[in-house]
Amino acid sequence: MRICPAIGKEVNVLAQIKISDLTFCYEGSYDNIFEHVNLQFDSDWRCGLIGRNGKGKTTFLKLLTGAYEYSGAVTGSIECVYFPYTLPSPIPASQTTMELLEELNPDYELWKVCRELDQLLVDPEVLNRSFHTLSGGEQTKILLALLFSGENRFLLIDEPTNHLDMEGREKTARYLRKKKGFLLVSHDKWFLDQCVDHVLVLERQTITVMQGNFTSWQEQKAKRDAYALAENERLQKDISHLREAARQAEGWSNAVEKTKLGTRTGGLRPDRGFIGHKSAKMMKRAKNTQHRMEKAAQEKEGLLNNLETVEELKLFPLTYHKERLIKAEELSLFYGEKPVCQDVGFELRNGMQLALKGGNGCGKSSILKKILGEEIESRGELFIASNLVVSYVPQDVSRLSGGLLDYARERGLTEHLFLALLRKLDFPRVQFEKDMSCYSEGQKKKAALAASLLTRAHLYIWDEPLNYIDIFSRMQLAELIRAYRPSMLLVEHDRSFLDEIGAEILEVGAGIPQNKT
């Protein structure tokens, strides 16, 4: 606040966060994650942070909080707060949610948290329940309510949708659309479009800040890429012409130079000075042409530095000899006496992509596990075709460890194809030699997806495969599925992705697939 001389009253002054010459690399690493970054943004923006896995999105957020040492400067008159919170481990089973909130922020005000929960359409009664018993979606919403109950802070929200089902994402998007003052990392295009008014994009060579949502940035990016490709084509032609001109000029120069030692003509000696001068002029012309060609080549290279290419992936599914792969009729699953889903019915046929939809805890993952052979008590009918080869990607890959090539060999994969596929998913080569336990969650998930894609199978079962996967890799995967139409059964909450692959949707509990193609 400050006193406005014109009216003699206090008025809000918009705070800005300014980044000057920011350079950072992790200790022991020789590669800078950020180098001489300069940008600024207003503290009332609803800003989306977009970039490939491994580009440093989480690192960027942590730098804004001062968690790491760096060169350069980050200035602003407002506190930056990172989300998700670091939770105590383990959380006692008897600890209520309210007790946990007090531990995370002793100064929080209960009425403000309840106000935020009401906006998130969450019953404040959950505060009296054990946090341990809440679903991942409920936990996320409660912690978001705690986050937004504070004031005069700029919020750094890192992938809040990973534990939210489709309905939860809709509610959270509506909630965030009414807020301001945050920088949000998300790989869900639909979610970003619903709740941001600016985007900050970590591109290949630059950082772009612009007004709008993901779709508006994507449209502008497509225009810039098309212009870069057209200019690149023009420059390639210029370089070809310049190369030919340089070759001719150099040839002419050499030919003239040789006449200095020629025979007499009419008893006169050749004027070697004149011939040498003429040859030098031609050589200078050749050198100038060469310089112009090198400059055009550099310009061509610069044009394409920021081009975000989405390389084509390939899939080699097996074809099952019968049409029906799986059929469920009035299928109910139980853990002990507790039902997790009831009266589910569907039929999965060759070439069909079926997505299970429903709230957190409705039994979607349990259905997948039952099909995969896990011992889960059931009632009703579940038919699984005999000798069906299945490729599975689990929801949680956080425990992956060991060498990348060992991981490939354990799954019977061709090592060089596995690494080549990871490169197409923009997996940095420097990561190939590291232990997988050091990978980010997105990199672990990419390794699991690459292994699945290289496995020849009749059916691909993927449980929330896109958690932590960047937007550009999601586009690659969608294009792959559209091109090869493998038989798939998946749980996924990214509605844009499901629309793009033309998946049929099964509401778990309703048992009626809804064709969304």
Image: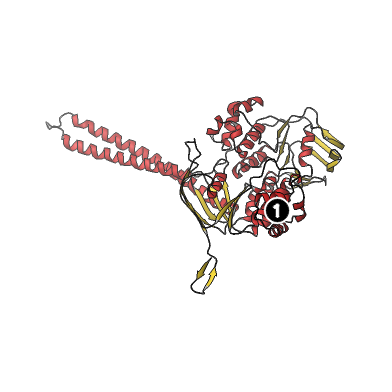
Percent position (x, y) of residue 324? Answer: 80, 35
Q: Residue at x 37, y 40 (%)?
A: 294
Instruction: Note whether 274 is above or below 222 in the view shown.
Output: above
Nearer to me, 196 or 307: 196
Q: Position of residue 116 (x, y in %)?
A: 69, 58
Q: Which residue is mark 1?
A: 170
Say how many tags the image has. 1
- How packed is label 1: few (under 14 Cα within 10 Å), some, or many (20 or more)? some
Task: Let me know if residue 469 appears in the view.
Answer: yes
- Can I make out residue 165 in this image? no
In percent of the image, x 68 and y 59: which residue is there? 112
Secondary element at image label 1: helix
Left or right position of 18 against 269: right
Q: Position of residue 50 (x, y in %)?
A: 57, 48
Taking depth in this image into account, of 501 and 37 the one nearest to the observer is: 37
Q: In the image, is residue 328 above or below residue 219?
A: above
| Position in image of residue 330 (x %, y %) | 87, 41
Q: Look at the image and name its color scheme.
A: secondary structure
Q: Residue at x 54, y 68 (%)?
A: 11
Q: Is residue 434 above or below residue 8?
A: above
Amino acid type at mark 1: Glu
Q: Quadrant of residue 236?
A: top left
